[in-house]
Every structure is written in structure tokens, then in C-alpha cells.
Amino acid sequence: MTIKVLIVDDSAVVRQVLSQELSMQSDMEILATAPDPIFALEKMKVHWPDVIVLDIEMPKMDGITFLEKVMAMRPTPVVICSSLAGSGADVTLRALSAGAFAIVEKPQIGVRDFLKDSSESLVATVRAAASARMDRMRLTPGPGSSERIRPKLSADEMLAAPGAAMNVPMTEKFVAIGCSTGGTQALEVVLSALPRTSPGIVVVQHMPEQFTKGFALRLNKLCEVEVKEAETNDRILPGRVLIAPGGKHTMVVRSGAQYRVEVKDGPLVSRHKPSVDVLFRSVAKAAGRNAIGIIMTGMGDDGAHGMREMHEIGAKTYAQNEETCVVFGMPKEAIKLGGVDHVLGLGEFPRIIASIYDRQMLAI
């Protein structure tokens, strides 16, 4: 199937470069380009695209208003490609809430070179967008990776593989969650359903560093549990959700009978920072069977190896099913590696999380 792409950007340079890079792909066709949303809507009356690549700041109509119109008319995968993606985190979160599939940050200067260097990442994002389940997108939109394709490093770059884990039953237990594309609203669905008495949770959601603090604040207003961006030495406590900050890795460490998080810099692992593989491996090392792991909607395979390590050390592991994922990438890879105990729908995770202290419940 040929993916028909519409590019909407007021910069002639951006339209030209994006058209060149995407049209080089045998499975992609540039349906049209437009300098503003009004012109784009006229084009769409004749031919509707499979994927829209959209700037945010444009004349006549801003990108978010256009995005909302598209989602109201005919939900279509939209990849935001904007210089505001970095400096305007609030604006970008609004785009994600409105149904944007992914975010690609472009710099204020050097746009031509950046787009050429990042073409592999953009192509991968457009392909994933074309296959997204848009019937779920309004419930679970999520960001893509703004990083160019790089050598795929493993969690070995950050910490050694788990050996003898702390498997003695402890009073304190917690949940580790990993997700990417589709994860922002999927997390909202799960976390907003939890009571304040829920176990502590640590989350890696693939997001650039400018987004995670605002994302955590937004969730904190919507949920009974406390939600905050993780900081080194934050304790994992019942009723608290720690969101891994963008641009850093988050790891769990054991301190006596308590669990805390450590936030530190490092290379991209599984092409991401924060990386789910790093979080899950640290959980396997520090907590063993005293934690459970959940992997949800997202592109790629980050978290698949870490989840297998959690599974092998005795932790219970769960993956979101294909029927409720926007992109069944990360859960699919974790299942293929044999690291998943149970595959569940999105709506079942609040029950699993709330029952972490009930061994009988976790056995199903």
C-alpha cells in the first residue's frame, strides 16, 4: 500500500525537503503540500491523505485548530513537525491531547540539514502513523521519537544485568510501566482510575525533556494519586506516581527496606532516553518479584529485553493487547521474547495495579 502524505508548513524550505525525503521511499507518495491549513483543507476536499505532517505556528489558522478540525471531520494520523515542539511544551501537549500521533522537533535554524539527517526517524514515524488504529487515537494519542536513528545500545550501557535479585518478600511493592506512542492518554486512562491507596508506580513514557514535567502536572490534576516528575532520591510510595524525566534515564534502587529512584544522564538505550529497558532492568536487580511490570502501546521494542529480565527473576509481567493499542509494537516484541505472563486490555490494568498486594489476584 502506498502511503499518501500531505505536508502543511508555511516554510517553502521545509515543504521542499520533506517532500524530497519522503518521496524517495517506495511506499510513500506526496499527495500535496500546503503553506497553511486553509489551503490544505481545500486540497483535502479532492484527495484525503493517509498521514499529515503538520507545523504548529502558521498564518491564517494555527496547527492545533487545524488538527482539531481534522479529527472532528475524519480522524487521520498527524505527525507534528515544528520548532515549537521544543520550546512550547504546553502547546505540544495540547496537540497530543487533540489527537496528534507523534512529535518531531525541528530547530529554529539549520532546518534543511536537520531534516535530512533525521529522515530515517521521520520516515519510520510516518510509516507507523499510517498503520495506527485511529479508532483509538482520540483515547490514546502519544508522541513519537524526535531522535534520529542511531546505533541501538542496550541497558548494559547504564547498569549490569541482574544477578541474584532481592526476592525476599517485602511489605513495599510497586509497579513499573513503560509506554511510547499512544501512551500519554493510555496512562491517563489507567492512572485516573486508581484510588489514592494504590501502590507506588514508576513510569517511562517516551517524551522529550521539555514535556515530562508538564505532563506530570497535568496528570496530577486529573488523578487521585500524586503524580510528579521523578527526581533522584524520590521514594516510591503508595499513592505516588513518578514520571521519568525526558532526556535522562530513571532507575530504581533499593535502600534498606525502601525503594527509591535515581535519575542520571547517559547514552540512548534502545534508541531512547529515558529507556524502558533501563527502568525494567533496574527493577529486576533491585526488587525482583516485589514489583510487577507493565508494557503498553508504543513503536519499536524498547522494554522487551528488560521485561524478559523481570520475568526471569520472578516478577509478574503484563502487556497491553493489540485490540486496545494504538501501536502494537513494544508489547508485541515483549511477547515475542517470552517475557510476558499475561496480555490484557487497557481497561484491566487498574485492577491489576490495585491488587498488587493480593498474590491470588496477580496469578490471573
Image (spheres, rainbow, N blue to C red):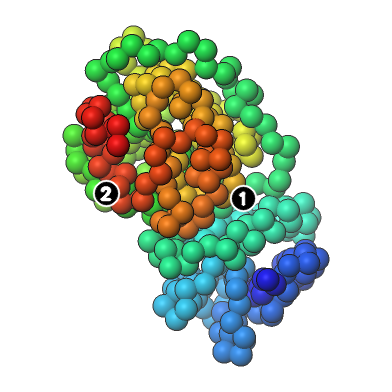
Decide if residue 359 is on the left or right side of residue 32: left
Is disc 1 placed on a helix, strand or loop? loop
Q: Where is residue 3 in the image (x, y as percent from the top left)?
A: 67, 71
Q: Marks 2 and 1, how far apart in space?
A: 27 Å
User: Looking at the image, which residue is at 41% across and 22% down?
Assistant: 314
Task: Determine which quarter of the picture holds residue 137.
Answer: bottom left
Front residue of 194/226: it is 194
Q: Where is residue 124 in the image (x, y as percent from the top left)?
A: 67, 56
User: Looking at the image, which residue is at 47% across and 58% down?
Assistant: 326
Instruction: Give above or below for 362 relative to 193.
Output: above
Is disc 2 placed on a helix, strand or loop? loop
Q: Which amino acid does label 2 sit on?
A: Ser
Instruction: Give above or below for 171 relative to 85.
Output: above
Circles 2 and 1, Cβ within 8 Å, touching? The answer is no
Instruction: Give above or below for 137 relative to 31.
Output: above
Q: In which quarter of the image is the N terminus?
A: bottom right
Front residue of 352/270: it is 352
Q: What residue type is labelled 1?
A: Ser
Task: Determine which quarter of the picture holds residue 202.
Answer: top left
Front residue of 97/123: it is 123
Identify residue for label 1: 146
Q: Marks 2 and 1: which is nearer the front?
A: 2
Q: Where is residue 248 in the image (x, y as percent from the top left)?
A: 54, 33
Q: Position of residue 234 (x, y in %)?
A: 36, 25
Front residue of 280/61: it is 280
User: Looking at the image, which residue is at 46% across and 54% down?
Assistant: 322
Identify residue for label 2: 192
Does label 2 or label 1 sit earlier along the sequence?
1
Q: Is residue 67 visible?
A: yes
